[in-house]
Image (cartoon, rainbow, N blue to C red):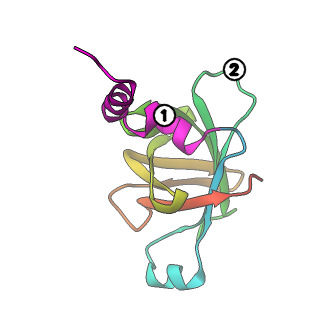
Amino acid sequence: MVVRPGICAAILMCANPAGAQSPQDRMFPDSATCYARVYTAQHLSQHPEQRVTTMRLFPEAQTDDPRLVLQVQVVIRGTPGGGFEGYGYCENQGGELYCAMEGDAGGFSISPARDGAILVALSSLGLSFENEAGFVSLTKNKGDDRSFLLRPSPCR
């Protein structure tokens, strides 16, 4: 039996979609890949139960952890202090990334979306943040803060 190189390459591509790239490699190929969304007043008026007005994800370039570490920044309306940040420790899980927040503060998944965007979806644990003014939690089963479509953005 003679196997041609072109057929071998086609078989490998079918067996391993996206050219063997992991979700992390596809969505965060380097430390200069960041995502953000600042929701417009129009969007927020159409979603009065949504409290998150801004979300940003930044890879932490200098870390000893072998996992992808993302700084998560959110601005939440109606909350003292408004701005919060935390860190998610992410690992490939199937076709997406799953990120557990430090300090048992919940988790979220990240999956590729159209046109280079990503979809951030809260886990059943939700997300919790703390700042100098207090503590806030987002839950998967209440309000409009369940998933967020973020687009590529300049880092910082």
Residue 128 makes an appearance in the image: yes
**Is 136 situated above or below 15?**
below
Proximity of marks 1 and 2: CB atoms separated by less than 8 Å: no
Q: Secondary structure at mark 1?
A: loop
Give 79 or 67, whichever is nearer the viewer: 67
Residue type of the residue flagged with mark 1? Gln
Say which residue appears at 58% left-offset and 71% top-offset.
78
Based on the picture, tell me whether residue 26 belongs to the magenta stretch: yes
What is the quadrant of residue 75 in the picture? bottom right
Closer to us: mark 1 or mark 2? 1
Give 152 or 56, whichever is nearer the viewer: 152
Say which residue appears at 50% left-offset and 85% top-offset.
45
**Is 77 situated above or below 85?**
below
Mark 1 and mark 2 lie on one chain; the one further toward the N terminus is 1
**Is 52 situated above or below 91?**
below
Which residue in the protein does label 2 denote? 64
CA separation, marks 1 and 2? 23 Å
Based on the picture, tell me whether residue 142 belongs to the magenta stretch: no
Percent position (x, y) of residue 13? 37, 34
Picture disc at residue 12: none
Which residue in the protein does label 1 denote? 21
